[in-house]
Amino acid sequence: MVETTISVIKADIGSLAGHVVVPDFLFELARKELKAGVENKIINDFYVTNAGDDLELIMTHNKGENNEEVHRLAFETFLKGTELAREKKIYAAGQDILSDTFSGNVKGMGPGSAEMTIEERKSEPFAILMADKTEPGAFNLPLFKIFADPFNTAGLVIDPNLHDGFRFVIQDIMKDVPCFVEMKCPEEMYDVLALLGSTGRFTIKKVYRADGMVCASVSTDKLHAVAGKYVGKDDPVAIIRAHSGLPAMGEILEAFTLPHLVSGWMRGSHTGPLIPVGLKDSRCTRFDGPPRVIGLGFQVSNGMLVGPVDLFDDVAFDITRQRAMEVSDYLRRHGPFQPHRLSDDQMEYTTLPKVLSACANRFVEEEIVPKGTVKDTSDSAE
Ligand code: 13P
Ligand code: 13P
Ligand code: MG
Ligand code: MG
């Protein structure tokens, strides 16, 4: 059977009027480059879109994951786009490009990637979820719900093909060398949750059905850890297969109705709700957010993409969006205070440590009585 690889490679290479949207000329450039990639038989098919300020290259091919030619095509597209964005003085041109020397793979070079190699089933529906103003751990909660929570996914109870559960490959993204663990749900559910609750540290890399069939893949690239400083959040993407012995498309989307709190938003330094939106709302405005996720549904047929359908462009998500806006409004009232602003360890790669280090050498080891203060004499007043 023919194996098809779905690769989603993305980068923020410059955005319009702040961190809002990818400018049109970058879409045009990306489509032209990927069309040449099809002509040169590097990829079979592609779709270009944006999650806010992130340019998303969705590609299919038969070359497997981490393929040098495919990664080079994406990387060179980003380099050419960066050059054009710089010429036009587009904001944050080349934001996610940490080096312009390609070394065989986009990993560690700034762009994020999620890839999955599948044996095409009789019909092969899948969703690509792309988020802006957040981090890979934002997908922990929905992916757990999709593949392990029977209150979300009816099929876990109803469909015998899902009944044996799913295996999660979880990555410790704080480690310099990639580090993974495999855990099975429902058997090890509490251990899975013990890890996945730490969204800034442990993220789902892949999900497999009990019998080994691959079902989901997430980008886990840590841009700031590579750059050593704040250069935007690692806005993540996920590929999730649906139906015929896997969670249904509606069960995948159901997991985004909370809307749950994630790290990111303004300056990558705040907690906010993840709003599911249609493509027309794929732009972050209020306080550079709130964080949002778009979903495109495709089918892959003999290596070619059929679709997409704009999955969250539906009134059924209006209630989620309304709740998210109320939560946003409530959180914003906290201004610079935690937990709206992230905790100190999460602020390590932002510009806050510079401000704090200027304050640090003013601290002394006894309580200060400011000059000109009238001392309290009530003790000796008898
Ligand atoms: P599948 O078994 O094809 O996934 O169908 C399930 C379904 O009908 C979901 O609504
Ligand atoms: P991005 O990571 O989406 O570029 O956003 C950066 C930022 O600082 C938003 O305020
Ligand atoms: Mg940006
Ligand atoms: Mg972004």
Image (spheres, rainbow, N blue to C red):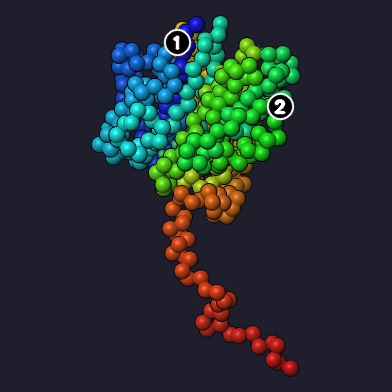
Question: Which x, y percent locates residue 63?
Answer: 40, 16
What residue lies at 56% left-to-right and 23% top-to-bottom?
216
Q: Residue at x 45, y 62 (%)?
A: 357
Q: Percent position (x, y) of residue 206?
A: 55, 26
Q: CA distance from mark 1 to mark 2?
A: 33 Å
Callout 2 secondary element? loop
| Mark carried by residue 303 | 1
Q: Is residue 59 in view?
A: yes
Given residues 218 and 85, the one toward you in this image is 218
The relative height of residue 366 versus residue 355 in the rendered view (above or below) is below
Q: Position of residue 367 (x, y in %)?
A: 58, 76
Q: Nearer the viewer, residue 258 or 361?
A: 361
Q: Residue at x 42, y 29 (%)?
A: 10
User: Circle 2 sits on which residue?
Assistant: 186
Residue type, numbered disc 1: Gly
Q: Quadrant of the C terminus?
A: bottom right
**Dividing the picture into quarters, in which one does residue 373 lie?**
bottom right
Give the residue type that dot 2 points to.
Answer: Pro
Q: Residue 190, located in which quarter of the rendered image?
A: top right
Q: Residues within 10 Å of mark 1 (few under 14, many from 20)?
A: many
